[in-house]
Amino acid sequence: MEFPFDINQLFSERVSILDQTLVAGRKSAGRPDLQAHIATVIDELGRASAKAQQLTAPITSASKLQSQRHQLYLLKDGERNGGRGVVVGFLKVGYKKLFLLDRQGVHVEAEPLCVLDFYIAENLQRHGYGLELFDFVLQHKNLEPVLMAYDRPSPKLLSFLAKHYCLTQSVPQVNNFVVFEGFFLNREAAQ
Ligand code: ACO
């Protein structure tokens, strides 16, 4: 995804972590011009993700990020676009208090890290960028994918999780979240 400004100036790291402050590293702190560009990037990514998932409205935008306690991991490829860089995609996560059903159908209250939105630019999908970004988040959070919950996962995300992390057996829920076999097991072991 290309923008009419220098992506490398905006995001110095290959993966940037954005939160309520919309600041990507020290460079954009106290720079309203750069923060406006960051907001443009997030809004554009949110719109593209919604379109890819056929949602009626984006679930990710700069204003939503500012008002929610979520984290957005943004992946760039700094080499493309004549060295100005392109935005490859993003993964948004956040902790949510959920009422889940375990394998026996017993209600369990949990506050797992949830995958809320995930998008790789159309022309760059199926090139391993999604895996790179997901693995970065797992390392950063020191977490296994089986311990996370997935908000309304698309068929592509379900296929991605099965391929890369062998997550295939979900435990039926009455809400939009999907958790997999092992979610409750590992919680018990961790307690
Ligand atoms: N059809 C089916 N499966 C796909 C597709 C596709 N078009 N694209 C990726 N996948 C899955 C497959 O398992 C694929 O393996 P395969 O090529 O051997 O079949 C695997 O992902 C490829 O892995 P990566 O290259 O690392 O994944 P990618 O960079 O494409 O990122 C992502 C995966 C984020 C799901 C991307 O395909 C995408 O943006 N899709 C559109 C938006 C979307 O559905 N996002 C998830 C929303 S749900 C949520 O966020 C909770």
Image (cartoon, helix red, strand yellow):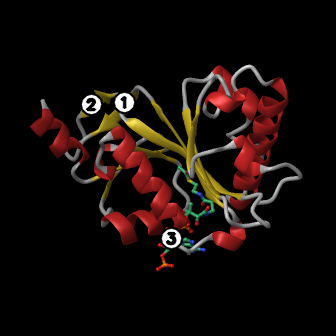
Judge left or right: residue 64 versus residue 5: left
Q: Position of residue 20 (x, y in %)?
A: 62, 24
Report which residue position mark 2 lands on: 108
Q: Which mark is residue 128?
A: 3
* Of callouts 2 and 3, the N-terminal one: 2
What is the secondary structure assignment of the residue under circle 3?
Answer: loop
**Under 8 Å from ligand 1: the CB of mark 3?**
yes
* Of callouts 1 and 3, the N-terminal one: 1
Q: Residue at x 17, y 43 (%)?
A: 186
**The image quarter in which residue 86 lies:** bottom right
Kind of residue sitting beneath label 3: Gly
* Quadrant of ligand 1 in image: bottom right
Q: Label 1: how many residues lie within 10 Å, few (<14), some (14-19) or many (20+)? A: some
What is the secondary structure assignment of the residue under circle 2?
Answer: strand
Give whichever of 22, 98 is nearer the camera.
22
Question: Viewer-nearest of labels 1 and 3?
Answer: 3
Q: Residue at x 84, y 53 (%)?
A: 3
Kind of residue sitting beneath label 1: Phe
Q: Alpha-carbon distance for marks 2 and 3?
A: 35 Å
Q: Position of residue 123 (x, y in %)?
A: 71, 72
Report which residue position mark 1 lands on: 99
What is the secondary structure assignment of the residue under circle 1?
Answer: strand
Judge left or right: residue 12 versus residue 132: right
Give whichever of 128, 163 is nearer the camera.
128
Kind of residue sitting beneath label 2: Val
Q: Residue at x 30, y 39 (%)?
A: 101
Judge left or right: residue 114 versus residue 75: left
